């Protein structure tokens, strides 16, 4: 199937770089798969594709099937469980620097979303580069998502940038599923205890902007390590980060799969 035909399509965006979009996108895809959903993860960060590193898929390349279609990579995470993954890096290799202008980027996004043959998907999760430029606008037009998840940190500058992402989504008429506050307080990896410095900014901002606050994820050295080692934190059940994020996943499933959710007729 084409990505646009996935039952639910979610874009992960932020106004500012480095706030944890890829971390959220990867763990959301895995979290949904753990609840038995069929999930495809598209890395639409053309100039800085980080999904392959976070999932240890750096060696992956697309190879067309006999019938000319391209299949995504499959990452198994348990018996009968896994996610399909596609990234620009599978097309051009991870070491090639990419300096493309808008029209070429748009063409590549059309290729990434149009040419790949996914399994029947319940969810398409799209990881985007920071900011409000070509990629989120193009993906929103191509996939007509259920909505965007905006990731921010609790710090003022990132919150201001998150407001730009809210404005962009509203201008594009793309629903906003809500805001996640990442790097919110410090979660001790030994005792699991949490120190709540600088938290709550995003919750206040969400209330002010009239959007849903989806939850928060603490600063956790294990999350940083898990990003580098290619073993996302959702695969380490029982950790504070996995528990916090599980609540976000369950909340999204309940909302998007509720019988009265407007997109469930597709
Ligand atoms: N809660 C957290 N605690 C500790 N480290 C984190 C946390 N969230 C993300 N990180 C780390 O911060 C770095 C940036 O995260 P990530 O790549 O997910 O951000 P991004 O918003 O996708 O960045 P970019 O804008 O460059 O695409 C990564 O090394 C990641 O492992
Ligand atoms: Mg990223």
Image (tube, rainbow, N blue to C red):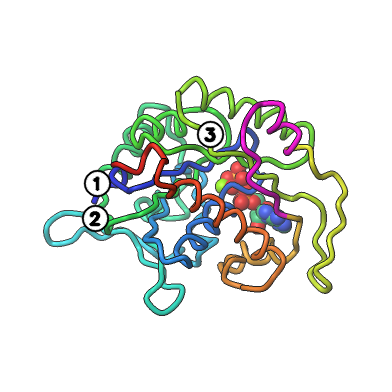
Structural distance between the alpha carbons of marks 1 and 2: 7 Å
Q: Earlier in the sequence, mark 2 or mark 3?
A: 2
Structural distance between the alpha carbons of marks 1 and 3: 27 Å
Q: Secondary structure at mark 2?
A: loop
Query: Looking at the image, do the residues carrying marks 1 and 2 touch, with CB atoms under 8 Å apart?
Result: yes
Q: Which residues are magenta?
A: 203-217
- Whether 211 is among the magenta residues is yes
Structural distance between the alpha carbons of marks 2 and 3: 31 Å
Q: Earlier in the sequence, mark 1 or mark 3?
A: 1
Q: Position of residue 179 (x, y in %)?
A: 63, 40
Q: Residue at x 66, y 41 (%)?
A: 213
Asked if residue 263 lies left or right of residue 179, the reply is: left
The residue indicated by pointer 1 is 115
Q: Which mark is residue 70?
A: 2
Q: Residue at x 24, y 46 (%)?
A: 115
Q: Position of residue 172 (x, y in %)?
A: 45, 23
Q: Residue at x 70, y 31 (%)?
A: 207
Residue 10, quarter of the rendered image: top left
Q: Secondary structure at mark 1?
A: loop
Query: Viewer-nearest of labels 1 and 3?
Result: 3
Quadrant where the C terminus sits is top left
Q: Earlier in the sequence, mark 1 or mark 2?
A: 2
The residue indicated by pointer 3 is 176
Asked if residue 17 lies left or right of residue 78, the reply is: right
Q: Which mark is residue 152?
A: none
């Amino acid at each position: 199937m084409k990505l646009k035909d996935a039952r639910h399509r979610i874009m992960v965006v932020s106004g500012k770089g480095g706030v944890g979009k890829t971390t959220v996108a990867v763990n959301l895809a895995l979290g949904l798969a753990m609840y038995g959903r069929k999930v495809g993860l598209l890395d639409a960060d053309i100039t800085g594709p980080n999904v392959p590193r976070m999932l240890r898929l750096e060696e992956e390349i697309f190879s067309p099937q006999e019938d000319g279609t391209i299949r995504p990579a499959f990452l198994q995470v348990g018996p009968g469980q896994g996610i399909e993954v596609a990234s620009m890096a599978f097309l051009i290799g991870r070491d090639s620097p990419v300096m493309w202008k808008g029209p070429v980027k748009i063409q590549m996004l059309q290729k990434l979303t149009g040419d790949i043959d996914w399994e029947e998907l319940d969810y398409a999760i799209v990881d985007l580069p920071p900011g409000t430029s070509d990629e989120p606008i193009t993906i929103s037009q191509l996939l007509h998502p259920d909505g965007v998840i905006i990731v921010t940190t609790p710090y003022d500058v990132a919150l201001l940038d998150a407001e730009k992402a809210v404005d962009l989504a509203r201008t594009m008429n793309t629903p906003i599923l809500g805001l996640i506050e990442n790097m919110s307080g410090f979660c001790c990896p030994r005792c699991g205890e949490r120190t709540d410095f600088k938290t709550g900014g995003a919750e206040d901002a969400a209330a002010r902007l009239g959007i849903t606050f989806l939850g928060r994820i603490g600063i956790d050295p294990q999350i940083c390590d898990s990003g580098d080692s290619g073993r996302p934190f959702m695969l380490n059940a029982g950790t504070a980060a996995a528990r916090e994020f599980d609540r976000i996943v369950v909340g999204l499933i309940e909302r998007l799969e509720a019988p009265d959710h407007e997109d469930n007729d597709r």
